[in-house]
Amino acid sequence: MTVGIPQLRAFVAVADAGGFGTAAQRLGISQSAVSHAVAALERATGRLVLSRNGRPTPTRFGEQILDHARTVVASVTAITVLAADRDGQPRGELTVAAPPTVCHGLLPELVLRWRAEFPGVSVSLFEGEDDEVAGWLEGGTADLAVLIDPPTRPSGSAQVGADRFHAVLRADHPLAQEPSVDLADLADDDFLLSAGGCERQIRELHRQAGATFAPAHRIRQLSTLFAMVRAGVGVTVIPGLAAGMEGPGLMLVPLSQSMARCLVLSGPLSRPWHPAARALVDAASP
């Protein structure tokens, strides 16, 4: 059995992109070439790696080899980048993953800084919820990620922010014009929980306030969450980096509870970092 690197690269691209056409665009080759590469991998292994019923997804065997394929592709990319290095300047294409509020409130400034300092580095952004982001980083989909309160910080990672929590209230709410609000004072309002992340921190905020944590609704999309607060369904709590995403008719009011979430820019724990990743992390450090 001979498995080629182009075959693995095509397989990983389709698994990540969710389609042969998008994978072809990412790889800069034709869709036919991607299809042939994946088919060659399946001939070499004697097993199907992708289910082609609708949106292509890894088969059970494909799932078993996907992390190994990512590791091979990442290692070959790193070797290529290092071999091309003639002046010590970071180069390459990196994918950075982060939660939506971080993509909105923190990453635009970082991307501008990276573009100015490292013209040879191209950065793509993946937006996902907290658990998704951590999984993408360790699985190889992302080269760097902004992790929220990570239990373990890899060597070389850097804290890039500390984000306080805010209550989201309708503009006509009695407490909307206050300089801060105690979570206990919102006990009479139905609480809407953002199901995309930060539940652990929000539970702790309720504990600190002596308030009962009993969400009336769990909503994954921030846009829907804001729409429900705007409609008067209830109130919610979100990180401050979401400021500006809420739209008209809503107010973000800082909570009296002082707990903040720690934002850490990091490469993976379980595999080598992309050669340019440490330069980006160092440049992002306050």
Image (cartoon, grey):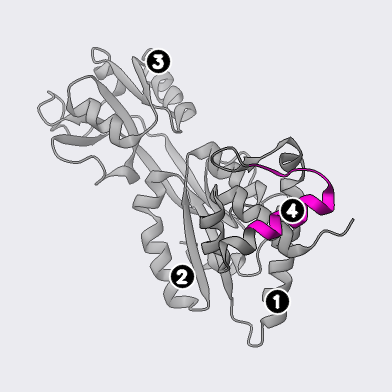
Q: Give the residue type that dot 2 points to.
A: Trp
Residue 81 in percent (x, y) is at 67, 75
Q: Which residue is mark 1?
A: 82
Q: Report helix, strand or loop for mark 1.
A: helix
- Look at the picture and state if 34 lies above or below 275: above
Q: Report helix, strand or loop for mark 3.
A: loop
Instruction: Give the CA separation, mark 4 to mark 1.
Output: 20 Å
Instruction: Give the CA separation, mark 4 to mark 3.
Output: 43 Å
Q: Which mark is residue 69?
A: 4
Q: Earlier in the sequence, mark 3 or mark 2?
A: 2
Q: Give yes or no for residue 113 being in the magenta stretch.
A: no
Label 1 or label 2, whichever lies nearer to me, is 1
Q: Quadrant of residue 243?
A: top left
Instruction: Give the CA separation, mark 1 to mark 2.
Output: 19 Å
Label 4 or label 1, whichever lies nearer to me, is 4
Residues shaded magenta? 35-51
Tags 4 and 1 touching, CB below 8 Å: no
110 and 97: which one is in front? 97
Residue drawn at x 12%, y 31% is 171
